[in-house]
Amino acid sequence: MDAAHIRNFSIIAHIDHGKTTLSDRLLHRTGTIATRDMSAQLLDAMDLEKERGITIKAHPVTMLYKAKNGETYELNLIDTPGHVDFSYEVSRSLSACEGALLVIDAAQGVEAQTVANYHLAAKQNLFIIPVINKIDLPHADVAQAKRQLEDVLAVPSEDAIPCSAKEGIGIEDILEAIVARIPPPKPTGERSLQALAFDSYYDTYKGVVTHVRVFNGEIKPGMMVKLVHSGQNFEVKEVGSFNPKPYSRDKLETGETGYMTANIKSASDVKMGDTITDARNPSGILPGFKEIHPMVFSGIYPINTADYEGLKSAMGKLQLNDSAFAYSTETSVALGFGFRCGFLGLLHMEIVQERLRREYDMDIIATYPSVVYKVTLNDKTEKEVDNPAFLPDVTYIEKIEEPMVKAFVICPNENIGDMMSLFSEKRGALDHTETLDAKRVMLTALLPLNEILIDFHDRIKSMTRGYGSMDYEHEGYQESDMVKLDMLVNDEPMDAFSSIVHRTKAEGRGRSLAEKLKEVIPRQQFQVKIQAAIGGKIVASESVSAFRKDVTAKCYGGDVSRKRKLLEKQKEGEKRMKSIGNVNIPQEAFIEVLKS
């Protein structure tokens, strides 16, 4: 189709503002999906996506729409994930578009991720059409949502289209606005093919299927193409589009979105955001490419050591469908053979673990998540450390820097005090506050990534009774007083419980771990001491008392010195046993502590 009749757009919104329902409704209204094939959350392919109501992978789909002016247009929708962990995927998808629908819930108004995604779209110079969804709800406040659009995002409220994706109200207006307001794609003017690879997935029969947006030239079967950043050449086998199932086409032309297959065996060969060009006559590189780097690391081990090979092959398969997930082998004294895994963020980590359990039927245990620290040694060499076991000795370290995030928290006015105390508890600092309306404020704070890993989001939700929302972006590194906390059981370090923590938090964390270990370590014939240590300094200590045998039972009277003699003899035996006895901590004990 000629470029003047093509419109490329995506839908951006905060989690649960009706983005996937709206895309379902657009597919139905344009006749892309027959009524009998309709189902809720049609573009969410995974059970996990349907259950949690979140989009994990971007899904492109091509629709043909006959507008009121009688012309037929090709509308390419790229459904993007809403969660902050996948923001790079969102920015890649947005760079394949000329416009975006910004969906706002009429009942909840502008939320933290609405603001973040709006800024992402504005940075890419996209034309934004605001859509106020869920106007059919009894507590919907359209006027309030329009006010927030103007005050928070500086978007004219008269441009907003009221709709209800669930009831199908206003869908026609949205389609007409896409045709009228979003500009058609323009060729870049390069001499040959220029296409953006914005996503990929692995197909057992075809190999890696790459999602592409053609900016210049055309791509068709039989062509030799070059992936610029990975530097490899491939022959194109098939091109096509999605509706939402893939169907093949003769070629993809300037402005069109679809897929290509080219006998690519590994997902790591196709980097997200890579430029695809003609191998014989290469053209310039499209801007905005960056390598995906994992931000959060955790060890994943099979609960039954016999499952190690099974887990290894499951991770290999999972990596084919998720290029952001990285893993390498590691061993632990306590947990045996396992893997060190890197994730984009906490939700990504949760999703990967859940997929391993469900799709591959693996029983796994994960160690305490950690982030990547930059360690500068005395000889000025820099080292990146993601595992406490690899932290050099404190005498060789000049400084440790930890990753920081800028967090945007939207909460009701009455919770400002609670939020500020939460920030200070997490070693954060409030940067500034912004009033959104009479009831809500947006707080911007600088926090260490390490502190928001575990319970930060849950705490915000419980403090604000569910009305708070948060989003964050990475804000570089900052020098910090970080130390390695070791857990010792009978003077033996337990590597599974080691962690890198801030000096002020080390004692509290050590004490809570020691108390937990005291509960789960079985009693021995001798006393077992459990200690938390920073270097050579013990910061917390607990002990598991020994089984007692009443050696004085046979002593029935006579002088007290006979009793004392028996107790002294027992004491000597205990001492000898303690020096040669081993404490065997059962696997269940490790799992119990790591779960908590």
Image (spheres, rainbow, N blue to C red):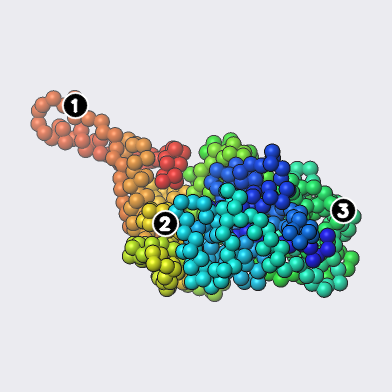
Three-letter amino acid code of the residue under disc 1: Ala
Q: Amino acid at mark 2?
A: Tyr
User: For the point 79% across and 43% down, which residue is it?
Assistant: 205
Q: Is residue 443 left or right of residue 50?
A: left
In the shown orientation, is residue 424 left or right of residue 373? left
Q: Residue tagged by mark 2?
A: 467
The location of residue 513, given as percent across then percent down, is: 37, 50
Would you identify the image quadrant in which residue 441 lies? bottom left
Q: CA distance from mark 1 to mark 2?
A: 65 Å
Distance of mark 2 from mark 3, alpha carbons?
50 Å
Relative image position of residue 300 (x, y in whole percent): 55, 47
Residue at 64 percent across and 63 percent down: it is: 100
> Quick one: label 2 or label 3, which is nearer the N terminus?
3
The residue carrying mark 3 is 250
Q: Secondary structure at mark 2?
A: loop
Q: Residue at x 85, y 66 (%)?
A: 217
Give the residue at mark 1.
553
Looking at the image, residue 186 sits to the left or right of residue 124; the answer is: right
Q: Nearer the viewer, residue 121 or 231?
A: 121
Residue 118, x across and y down, in percent: 57, 66
Residue toward you, 391 or 34: 34
Q: Quick check: can you spot residue 519?
A: yes
Query: Counting other residues with Cα less than 10 Å from the Cα at mark 3, is it few (<14), some (14-19), or many (20 or more)?
Result: few
